[in-house]
Image: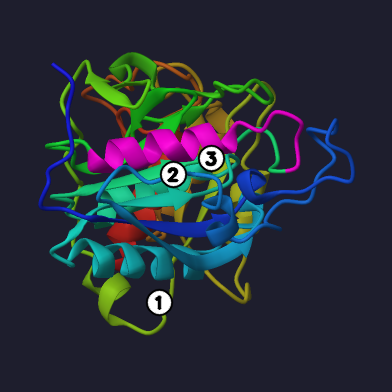
Amino acid sequence: MPDFPSPELRRVVVLGTGGTIAGKAASSGDNIGYTAGQVGVADLLGGIEAPQGVTLVAEQVAQLDSKDMSFETWQKLAQRCAHWLAEPDVAGVVVTHGTDTLEETAFFLHSVLACAKPVVLTCAMRPASALSPDGPQNVRDAIGVALAAGARGVTVVCAGAIHSGADVQKVHTYRLDAFASGDAGVVGYVEEGEVRRVRAWPEGGALPASKIFEAAAVQWPRVEIVMSHAGASGAVVEALLQPGNAEPVRGLVLAATGNGTLHHALEAAALKAQEAGVAVVRATRCMNGRILPKADDRLRDAGTLTPVKARIALMLELLG
């Protein structure tokens, strides 16, 4: 059965952060030579008709290319989401975002927000100036998800598919349906404005993250990602741990091969780092599957998390 909006909830808040969806190019035929984050979120909503009885509220949180996403923007975005979700007449929040780091922002929000209402991230692979932009339909679909009865948790809507914020990954550089959810599969689909779910709405991670909401600024722990590959060495790890670095490394995520395996030289350096008090986690480079732990593992694993998501999880853990 399709989900329909509850008549008691009358506002959907759309938070803008920039990205391709807000990008402009010199020519309408140019889908890659654009500058991201040029169109305000209020203007993005200009051609989108709200469902009957629903008011769209636009708020600009940031205006950047998502490749340059910052911890400070994440903190502000989480705070604004929490603020609007607490309003009794707000059905849900939509976030317009660039595609490059969308999966990281989605996982971060999934981890820190206990969402009884939906937070829906959406995006575009073509700029707003394109001859046939995909952003308007994605925003319309995201609003539909935000209004769906029973919707909750952090999701990503793109090209008609609904992904969980915990599972979503960008898997293509150019095509309009650039996202997938790996083994977990999509949450559902948006079809002509109606939401059709194929699995349950995601539950929020709700990690203890009071500092993110209470502090004016957060001292984010430095966590770096180091990849294992043929011919790898421990040189990068050793360089990161050199004394005298302005900002000491507190955590390492190792982008491991296969089932969490590491080049022996990189593993040796990582074990030394762990002995020195650095938090070390292995995450697989593989797009699907998870690391199956073994009894003799000396470095813990991130399970199903990709390296970039494992980094966020470790940062939040170290933030305490």
Alpha carbon distance from label 2 to label 3: 18 Å
Alpha carbon distance from label 1 to label 2: 38 Å
- Based on the picture, tell me whether residue 136 belongs to the magenta stretch: yes
- Based on the picture, tell me whether residue 84 belongs to the magenta stretch: no
Q: Residue at x 53, y 48 (%)?
A: 97
N-terminal-most mark, 3 or 1: 3
Q: Identify the element where label 3 is drawn.
A: loop
Q: Which residue is mark 1?
A: 218
User: Is residue 299 at all visible to an observer of this figure?
Assistant: no
**In the image, which is nearer the foreground, mark 2 or mark 3?**
2
Residue extending furthest toward the front: 52
Q: Which residue is mark 3?
A: 123
**In the image, which is nearer the foreground, mark 1 or mark 2?**
2
Q: Which residue is mark 2?
A: 49
Where is the N terminus found, in terms of image quarters? top left
Disc marking residue 242: none
Displayed quadrant of residue 309:
top left
Q: Residue at x 44, y 59 (%)?
A: 15
Q: Nearer the viewer, residue 63 or 24?
A: 24
Q: Identify the element where label 1 is drawn.
A: loop
Which residue type does callout 1 highlight?
Val
Q: Which residues are magenta?
A: 129-147
